[in-house]
């Protein structure tokens, strides 16, 4: 038995044979070592995986092992087992061209001799001596190595004494034979029972055969037909799926031609929807179809192309819309085309289309002005376009009426332009708002659906818990009430899913029951709004509410920007005409006409765009300030010239000035229109009648009233200059007050005009003129107050200061008149003597001067003022008379002197009260006497 088994005479490595083989951890992944190719072809080679880690002592002694490998050229050339070195080693391997050549020494390596090591030997000799000395002192290191080597040799000896494995094999076989002999009876009994076992197996085989025959008959009679029907039904369903899938593939195959057709009619929204639907079908239902492997990338490229086409189409539309003739009554150009473009751009998140529209607006505004100037210049025969080449220079050659008509035409064009821009932007804005509204409604519906589902789940969980508590089967409870609606919902969802089954047996012939989920989606979205423009809103719109709201605000800002663009271009047109000082040379009527035109345009644009643009308003304000300065300087210069030439004599009042003050009394603060017929027939009046009072005035004051009305009318015509006009008018009134004071009270008229003296009549006339201006100051104040903002009311204090200054001036004139008589009384009464005749010469002279004073001022001043003035003069008279009587020691004692004084005073009183308007004057002459002590 030992010969029938092959055994290896060499013991194999195990976990205990650490001397021959080191145990390797199987969990560690050790990269197998790849042996280098043998450079000696005569030696045997072998696979590295079939080699042992250590060489075998018996079998492998004549077989090539890893210890025979030579990994370098010296090992191959110096093989000790070869009889002689091969001379053709290189040529037989690498060819005859490989020959020995002499190695040329390198030029970069120096020649080394023993002298080069001399220094090193001298340095190391001392260390070598120390090393030898240490070797003699310390024990040799190889003692331990010898001990280890002895132990190793001993182990090898012990291993050689272990008997071979064939001996143990023989012992095992002997033991097996002994055990068989001990159980020989049972062994032979088992051999004899084999025949019975074979009989049992034969009967069992026959029974199995009969059973199989019966099962085959039952299968043929009862199962094969039903199974065949099921197989046919399954096959039919599979065919329906394949048919529907092929129909879907055919539809997808027509995507690109259909997209081309849609693009040819500029149906960008439909093309984008078709591409999105096809991409969805490719990813869900036709994923993995080899024939469509490139269709997805082609559709992506087509979508990028559509983006560029939409941008180009919108640019073309903007140019066509803004540059069509402004005489066209149509506000919106191809509204459906615009809506389609905007929906497509929103779908693709191309929100920079507003920048395109803004750039086109700027270009159009420039072209409008240029075309208007060209048309106007071409109508003027005096302008030679061959000589004057530049369009701006040609425009500057227009006179004011021609230039004003040109500006009016530009403003009219700009108004129509802004109306068109507003109509277009309103369409875009409505599209954005519809998308935003649809997003919000969709989100609300989703929230409501989620709430319903959550409520349904909660009720279902509650009922499930109750059924478990009551001990019922949950499946039975579901089969009664809950599973039916759930099954219906599941079925409907399955029919709507891409992998749904056909809805009926006739699904092959009914295309409505296909698995095209995208087509059902299109039907749902297309039914949302008529026209199909809302398809993309509820399906593929990618913009958030914040982005849509920001876009809507940008659209409104774009409308504001359109107004600003028109105003900026108008300002540039205005400034180009103002370079030669043209606007500053305009008269009041022309500038007011220009100002009204600009203000009307500003209001029109504000009404269209909803916001007031400030550039043109600022330019108008700047020109208005220049106009106000020139306006004021002209009138102040005119007033100065009038005052310098005024002789302060009462002037006749022309009828037109009477009409002027009458219109002011009627509440109309403006220059009246000239009446050619009636005014010439009316003669000038001596005085000016204002609200029943007579005013004797000089000619300068009449013109001043007209100038004041010009200021007020300018404020009505140019409201933006109200504050400036108020300041300038205040300055004008102050100038009149101060200059008239210098000329009359200061006697400046003696040098300026050449008057011989300033008479009481001059003073009274000056006072009355000042009173006339003071009468109109409240009217002027109310006029300006109605046109000021509440925060500007503080400027009205200028009129209060002016009124005070005028009253002070009037009081100074009255004081001057009293001072004139006071000096006269002092001169005459200082020579008064109480003696006959009566009345004395002094009193006759005084009464004569008083009559002259009365004659000078009575026709100029009102009766009340005359009485007040003469009361003050009488007080001065009584003061001087009392002083003189005191000096003469004349007392009220009833004596002769007292009688003479009483007679003179009575003469004075009678003459004074005899003057017109002084009859009832209370003179109280008793105050001339000293009181008795």
Image (cartoon, helix red, strand yellow):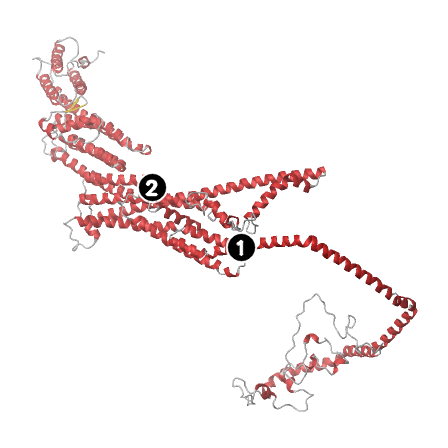
Instruction: Check the picture and name the quadrant holding the N terminus.
Output: bottom right
Q: Could you say whether the residue bearing mark 2 is in a helix, strand or loop?
A: helix
Say which of marks 2 and 1 sits in front. 1
Q: Which residue is mark 1?
A: 243
Q: Which mark is residue 609?
A: 2
Q: Which image quarter: residue 74?
A: bottom right
Q: Nearer the viewer, residue 3 or 803?
A: 3
Q: Nearer the viewer, residue 521 or 731?
A: 521
Image side of residue 851 versus residue 462, left or right: left
* x and y, in percent, of residue 360 in the image: 32, 51
Q: Please determine whether, in this image, residue 407 is positioned above or below residue 837.
A: below
| Residue most extreme to the left | 837
Q: Nearer the viewer, residue 693 or 308?
A: 308
Tell whether label 1 touches label 2 (CB within 8 Å): no
Q: Could you say whether the residue bearing mark 1 is in a helix, strand or loop?
A: helix
Visible residue check, residue 538? no
Q: Which mark is residue 115?
A: none
The 10 Å Cα crowd at callout 1, few under 14, some 14 to 19, many 20 or more, is: some
* x and y, in percent, of residue 39 in the image: 63, 83
Image side of residue 12 versus residue 767, left or right: right
* x and y, in percent, of residue 4 in the image: 82, 77
Q: Please determine whether, in this image, residue 707 is positioned above or below residue 513.
A: above
The 10 Å Cα crowd at callout 2, few under 14, some 14 to 19, many 20 or more, is: many
Q: How many marks?
A: 2
Instruction: Check the picture and name the quadrant holding the C terminus.
Output: top left
* x and y, in percent, of residue 468 in the image: 70, 39
């Amino acid at each position: 038995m030992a010969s029938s088994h092959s055994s290896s005479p060499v013991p194999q490595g195990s976990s205990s044979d650490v001397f021959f083989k080191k145990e390797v951890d199987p969990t560690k992944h050790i990269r197998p070592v790849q042996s280098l190719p043998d450079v000696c072809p005569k030696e045997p080679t072998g696979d590295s995986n079939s080699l042992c880690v250590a060489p075998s002592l018996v079998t492998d002694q004549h077989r090539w092992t890893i210890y025979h490998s030579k990994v370098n050229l010296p090992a191959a050339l110096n093989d000790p087992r070869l009889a002689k070195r091969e001379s053709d080693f290189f040529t037989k391997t690498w060819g005859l061209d490989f020959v020995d050549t002499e190695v040329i020494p390198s030029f970069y390596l120096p020649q080394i001799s023993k002298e080069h090591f001399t220094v090193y030997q001298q340095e190391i000799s001392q260390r070598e001596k120390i090393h030898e000395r240490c070797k003699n002192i310390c024990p040799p290191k190889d003692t331990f190595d010898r001990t280890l080597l002895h132990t190793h040799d001993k182990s090898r000896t012990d291993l050689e004494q272990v008997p071979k494995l064939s001996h143990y094999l023989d012992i095992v076989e002997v033991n097996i034979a002994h055990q068989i002999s001990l159980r020989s009876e049972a062994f032979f009994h088992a051999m004899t029972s084999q025949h019975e076992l074979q009989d049992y197996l034969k009967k069992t085989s026959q029974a199995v055969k009969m059973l199989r025959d019966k099962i085959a008959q039952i299968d043929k009679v009862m199962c094969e037909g039903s199974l065949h029907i099921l197989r046919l039904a399954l096959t039919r369903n599979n065919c329906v799926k394949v048919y529907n899938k092929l129909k879907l593939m055919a539809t997808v195959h027509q995507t690109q031609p259909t997209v081309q057709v849609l693009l040819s009619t500029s149906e960008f929204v439909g093309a984008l929807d078709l591409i999105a639907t096809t991409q969805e079908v490719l990813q869900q239902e036709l994923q993995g179809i080899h024939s469509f492997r490139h269709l997805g990338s082609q559709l992506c490229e087509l979508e990028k192309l559509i983006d560029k086409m939409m941008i180009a189409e919108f640019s073309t539309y903007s140019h066509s819309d803004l540059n069509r003739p402004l005489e066209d009554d149509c506000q919106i150009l191809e509204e459906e085309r615009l809506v389609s473009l905007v929906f497509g751009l929103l779908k693709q998140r191309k929100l920079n289309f507003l920048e395109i529209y803004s750039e086109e607006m700027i270009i159009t505004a420039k072209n409008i002005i240029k075309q208007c100037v060209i048309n106007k210049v071409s109508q003027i025969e005096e302008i030679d376009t061959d000589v004057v080449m530049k369009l701006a220079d040609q425009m500057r050659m227009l006179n004011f009426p021609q230039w004003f008509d040109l500006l009016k035409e530009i403003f009219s064009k700009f108004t129509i332009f802004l109306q068109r821009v507003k109509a277009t932007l309103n369409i875009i804005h409505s599209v954005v708002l519809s998308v935003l509204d649809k997003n919000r409604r969709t989100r609300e519906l989703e929230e409501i659906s989620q709430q319903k589902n959550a409520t349904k789940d909660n009720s279902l969980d509650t009922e499930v818990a109750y059924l478990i508590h009551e001990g019922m089967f949950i499946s039975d409870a579901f089969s009664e009430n809950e599973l039916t609606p759930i099954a219906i919902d599941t079925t409907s969802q399955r029919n709507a899913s891409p992998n749904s089954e056909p809805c009926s047996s006739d699904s092959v012939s009914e295309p409505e029951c296909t698995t095209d989920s995208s087509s059902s989606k299109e039907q749902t979205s297309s039914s949302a709004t008529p026209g199909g423009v809302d398809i993309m809103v509820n399906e593929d719109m990618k913009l958030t509410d914040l982005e849509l709201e920001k876009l809507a605000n940008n659209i409104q800002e774009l409308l504001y920007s359109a107004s600003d663009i028109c105003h900026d271009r108008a300002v540039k047109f205005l400034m180009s005409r103002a370079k030669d000082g043209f606007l500053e040379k305009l008269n009041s009527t022309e500038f007011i006409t220009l100002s009204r035109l600009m203000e009307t345009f500003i209001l029109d644009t504000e009404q269209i765009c909803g916001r007031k643009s400030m550039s043109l308003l600022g330019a108008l304000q700047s020109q208005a300030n220049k106009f106000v300065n020139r306006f004021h300087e002209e009138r102040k210069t005119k007033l100065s010239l009038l005052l310098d030439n005024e002789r302060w004599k009462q002037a006749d009042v022309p009828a037109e000035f009477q009409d002027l003050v009458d219109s002011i009394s009627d509440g109309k603060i403006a220059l009246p229109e000239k009446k050619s017929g009636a005014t010439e027939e009316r003669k000038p009046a001596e005085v000016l009648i204002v609200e029943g009072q007579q005013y004797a005035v000089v000619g300068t004051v009449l013109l001043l009233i007209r100038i004041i009305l010009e200021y007020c009318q300018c404020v009505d015509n140019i409201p933006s200059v109200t504050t400036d006009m108020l300041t300038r008018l205040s300055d004008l009134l102050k100038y009149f007050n101060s200059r008239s004071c210098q000329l009359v009270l200061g006697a400046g008229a003696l040098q300026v005009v050449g008057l011989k003296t300033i008479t009481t009549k001059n003073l009274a006339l000056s006072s009355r003129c000042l009173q006339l201006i003071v009468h109109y100051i409240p009217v002027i104040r109310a006029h300006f107050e109605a046109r000021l903002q509440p925060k500007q009311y503080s400027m009205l204090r200028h009129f209060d200061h002016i009124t005070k200054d005028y009253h002070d001036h009037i009081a100074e004139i009255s004081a001057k008149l009293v001072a004139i008589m006071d000096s006269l009384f002092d001169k005459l009464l200082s020579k008064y003597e109480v003696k006959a005749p009566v009345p004395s010469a002094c009193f006759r002279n005084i009464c004569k001067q008083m009559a002259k004073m009365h004659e000078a001022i009575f026709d100029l001043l009102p009766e009340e003022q005359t009485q007040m003035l003469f009361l003050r003069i009488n007080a001065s008279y009584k003061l001087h008379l009392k002083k003189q009587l005191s000096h003469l020691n004349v007392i009220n004692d009833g004596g002769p002197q007292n009688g003479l004084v009483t007679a003179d005073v009575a003469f004075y009183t009678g003459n004074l009260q005899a003057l017109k308007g002084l009859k009832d004057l209370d003179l109280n002459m008793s105050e001339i006497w000293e009181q008795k002590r």
